[in-house]
Image (cartoon, rainbow, N blue to C red):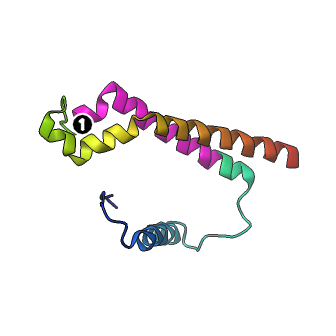
Amino acid sequence: MKFKFVNENKNNNKKIMDYIQNRLDIGNVKFKQEMPIGKFTLDDALEECTDLSLYLTSIILGIQKGEYVKTYGFNKPKKYRRSSLLYKAMRVLTSSRLRNLVMTIFFVCMIIWAISIVTS
């Protein structure tokens, strides 16, 4: 599924629900069952959170290193390129807000880990 930046907020909730439903459908096919309730543990949540922080960190470092610039043929931005989708996405992905998000996810992972140790 490709993401598209839209200037209007029309049908955003439906888009979000459609994306979640799509992920559930993929899981149903892949694992041949619906999402189980009561199967997962805090350790599972910790692993998923940690993986997410690793993926985001890898993307940020790749952008800062210029790997995505090479991959997508996006050289130094010119005036007309500043309005391009890729330029805007790179600005968001290299922003301090995203780095703060990654750190927040990391700390949430650590809290989940601590809770799982205390409760086990």
Q: Residue at x 33, y 58 (%)?
A: 3
Q: Residues within 10 Å of mark 1 (few under 14, many from 20)?
A: few
Q: Residue at x 30, y 28 (%)?
A: 66
**Quarter of the image where one finds residue 14:** bottom left
Q: Residue at x 47, y 39 (%)?
A: 98
Foreground residue, 25 or 5? Answer: 5
* Mark 1 secondary-structure assignment: helix
User: Which secondary structure dominates the residues rendered in magenta?
Assistant: helix
x and y, in percent, of residue 69 in the image: 25, 33
Q: Residue at x 18, y 36 (%)?
A: 73
Amino acid type indicated by mark 1: Thr
Residue at far top of view? 65
Residue under circle 1?
71
Q: Is 79 colored magenta in this rendering?
A: no
Q: Can residue 120 be seen by looking at this rendering?
A: no
x and y, in percent, of residue 107 in the image: 66, 38
Q: Is 49 colored magenta in this rendering?
A: yes
Q: Is residue 109 left or right of residue 12?
A: right
x and y, in percent, of residue 4 in the image: 30, 59
Q: Is residue 38 left or right of residue 97?
A: right
What span is in magenta?
Answer: 47-71
x and y, in percent, of residue 30 in the image: 49, 66
Q: Can residue 31 be seen by looking at this rendering?
A: yes
**86 w.r.t. 24: above or below:** above
Question: Quick one: quadrant of the N terminus?
Answer: bottom left
Foreground residue, 47 or 10? Answer: 10
Q: Is residue 70 left or right of residue 97?
A: left
